[in-house]
Image (spheres, rainbow, N blue to C red):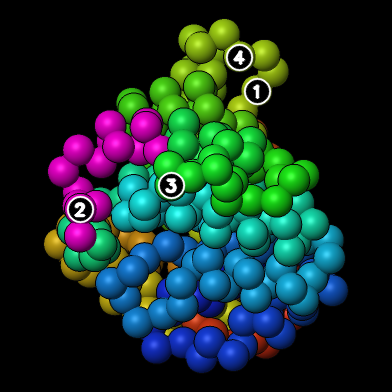
Amino acid sequence: MKIGTGLPNQVRNMSPDVVPGWAKLAEELGFATLTTVGRHAYPGLSDTVALAAAAAVTSRIELIPGVLLATTWPAPLLAKELASIDAVSGGRLTLGLGVGQRLDDFVAEGYGPKGRGARFDHDLEIYREVWRGEPVGGGPNPAVPPGTREIPMLFGGFAPAALNRMARWGEGYIGGSIPATMAAPMFDAARNAWREAGREGSPRLIALAYYALGDGEAGKANVHDYYSDHSAGGGDFANLASGAVCDTPAKVKDAISAFADLGVDEISFNTATDDIDDVKRLAEIVF
């Protein structure tokens, strides 16, 4: 099972200038992927900016937003933004996409939460059109240069529609930051949706877990803060998520073992603090 680590882009009041060094260190230490957390209405760093910064200072590690709130963006603009990151990285971007659930993240006029599922289905068509180099904006010009590839996609979410999109458009499923026992039914549902759609092989399955090895209490507080708003599930989910933070080597190893038992392909440990030394601490445990 591959091991990845997250960038601290959505830790409250994080230091943005830590991201390039974090990404470079994660690659040097041998992590397979770098993941981000996507939100707009939170005092952090945009996941697209964090991924672009990581792309510029690395050469091997895979980049995955986990997950990007696709429906909060105009589709042609997001498609170009993502193609640009992928091109800068040399083709190392894999998209983790979702529809979003927090109402305050829908900050762009005309791109509200109502009808976001149907909008997303339409947007996925637009992404492919943009990446194929078809003209945009009613004029003769494409948005991307020749050689732009169709970026592989993973899908997150708990609704049947999310799994159907995965089976139609994607390469796999990216789980929420919840314990393995709670994530198991969703990974099973993803496999079932894949088979029912007649797809060959198996979907790529990625698990997410939070960690904070230097200051566990600060990490738990940060995760609780992130999930404490009502639209994210409120206090109950905040307590669940913060209580599941891996703050000891034993908990990190237990999380790896539990998700390995579920047959997932990879686990990415999303950081709960912006302490760059935590990347080293995690590497010492997992490698």
Q: Earlier in the sequence, mark 4 or mark 2?
A: 2
* Pointer 1 residue: 202
| Tag 3 secondary structure | loop
User: What's the distance in space between the residues labelled 2 and 3, CA to CA?
Assistant: 17 Å
Q: Foreground mark, 4 or 1?
A: 4
| Tag 4 secondary structure | loop
Q: Which amino acid, mark 2?
A: Gly
Residue 224 image position (x, y, % from top left): 31, 73
Magenta residues? 109-123
User: What's the distance in space between the residues labelled 4 and 2, CA to CA?
Assistant: 35 Å
Residue 244 image position (x, y, % from top left): 43, 62
User: What's the distance in space between the residues labelled 2 and 1, CA to CA?
Assistant: 37 Å
* Pointer 4 residue: 199
* Pointer 2 residue: 110
Residue 28 image position (x, y, % from top left): 84, 74
Q: Foreground mark, 1 or 3?
A: 3
Q: Is residue 111 magenta?
A: yes
Q: Nearer the viewer, residue 164 or 124?
A: 124
Q: Nearer the viewer, residue 164 or 136?
A: 136
Q: Which amino acid, mark 4?
A: Arg
Q: Is residue 197 magenta?
A: no
Q: Nearer the viewer, residue 169 or 85?
A: 85
* Pointer 3 residue: 137
